[in-house]
Image (spheres, grey):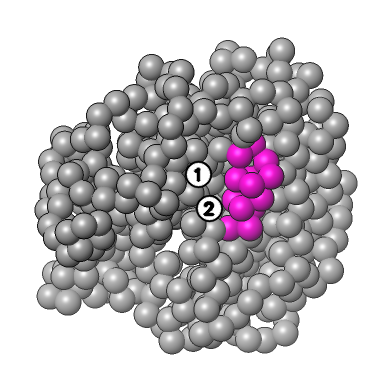
Amino acid sequence: MNSAVGCGCESPSCMRGDGVLSSHTEGQGKKQDGPQKDPNSSHLAYGILDNPPWYLCIFLGIQHFLTALGGLVAVPLILAKDLCLQHDPLTQSYLISTIFFVSGICTLLQVFLGVRLPILQGGTFAFVAPSLAMLSLPAWKCPEWTLNASQVNTSSPEFTEEWQKRIRELQGAVMVASCVQMLVGFSGLIGFLMRFIGPLTIAPTITLVALPLFDSAGSDAGIHWGISALTIFLIVLFSQYLKNVMVPVPVYGGEKKCHISKFNLFQVFPVLLALCLSWLFCFVLTVTNTLPKSPMAYGHMARTDTKGSVLSQAPWFRFPYPGQWGLPTVSLAGVFGIIAGVISSMVESVGDYHACARLVGAPPPPKHAINRGIGIEGLGCLLAGAWGTGNGTTSYSENVGALGITRFCTSSCTRILPFWPRIDHRGDEVGASQITLCSQTSSGTQLWSVTETKM
């Protein structure tokens, strides 16, 4: 956003140590001078116009990716049953990798051309309810033989056609509905309607849209409540109680070259550290066979080897492309259902823009910036429909909440982020591996994101 102002720390010691970031006094890592117009911005380590070191941007980008991991993976997994894919984890990994790829492209478009705030784009739960309603119609009910794992041959043309014709129907509905969103955004209509969109409109809408998250997150967390509780506990511990603990880290740069500096590691990477430690704990429990081997036993899905077969089946290189599932089809019922999701998604995004601007110390986004943001989100939904994610895109509230936790609000980290899902397509090995990660730890992160995100 052109009108955004820089915001930084009032003292050099704010949020960072004596050298790990301050050693970059010129060029990369240099903070931009400017008045701090928002008194709430003084606690930020890096404002929206600042440029942290490149290596810090990479890790912060990965952390944002992991914060969104639960939502990104949950959308294809929720749709899998109604797409007749509950017994085809390999195709599920294709859908997950596709939604990662499109989310990366849409995030770049939003950061550079849209509202220009550090805000992540990803799959939206506002489209899930109408999608499930459409797939529950008698014409799209899955045949009985697709529900029996012993009768499913995932490589047969009959099975492939069964799930592809359903996702093509979703593609067509999303692409037509996205044209409505682009019209509302680029015509300036959303800016005109801003007089009717206030806190009393946004807050209930976001609450109602987020309610289905508790159901899906609770189901995933119920796989092993101990691991989910551990993940939430670690995020709270790192972000709230250990945020001021300075950790010695090796640093190269400045006059001292190689030296040891102190850094607020826990405040900057609470989600990344929590996920890694939780997954490592699951790995130890798996190696020692503490977690049950029987698929019917409680806690079996917390093992890190439950999806090992998918890793061996997934190709190393696979590049998603528009129309990879065939030519999209359109039905009037599906279009109107997705348009209802588009309306709630737009209202939610307007609230996310204002919340993000407030957290990064920028002034409230003007109408022309909101128009651009909504228009770019419509373009993102069009791309998501063309690529065949089975969903659209929207701004992620949980990543706005992550800005409030880490206090790193520069757009550079969000620009680094899209390259992680794009590298993901070296292939579906990585996309498949994220199914194994999601089963153990991301459900806890998703529960935390739902409760943490606030206006």
Magenta residue check for 113: yes
Residue closer to the observer: 444 or 360:
360
Tell me if I can see residue 361 in this picture: yes
| Disc 2 secondary structure class | helix
- Residue at 52% across / 78% down in the picture? 427
Q: Position of residue 163 (x, y in %)?
A: 69, 69
Residue type for callout 1 = Ser
* Disc number placed over residue 171 in the picture, else none: none
Tell me if I can see residue 89 in this picture: no
Q: Is residue 450 left or right of residue 155?
A: left
Report the quarter where the N terminus lies.
Answer: top right
Q: Position of residue 447 (x, y in %)?
A: 36, 42
| Disc 1 secondary structure class | helix
- The Cα atoms of the two marked residues, 2 and 1, are separated by 6 Å
Q: Is residue 156 left or right of residue 244?
A: right
Q: Residues within 10 Å of mark 2 (few under 14, many from 20)?
A: many
Residue closer to the observer: 213 or 61:
61
Tell me where the magenta segment starts and ends, as one range. Answer: 104-116
Magenta residue check for 370: no
Q: Position of residue 332 (x, y in %)?
A: 87, 46
Q: Is residue 19 left or right of residue 436?
A: left
Q: Quadrant of residue 374?
A: top right
* Disc number placed over residue 415 in the picture, else none: 2
Residue closer to the observer: 363 or 94:
363
The relative height of residue 426 versus residue 170 in the rendered view (above or below) is below
Q: Residues within 10 Å of mark 1 (few under 14, many from 20)?
A: many
- Residue at 48% across / 64% down in the picture? 420
- Residue at 37% across / 49% down in the picture? 26
Residue type for callout 2 = Arg
The relative height of residue 416 versus residue 363 in the rendered view (above or below) is below
* Disc number placed over residue 411 in the picture, else none: 1
Q: Are marks 2 and 1 in contact (CB under 8 Å)?
A: yes
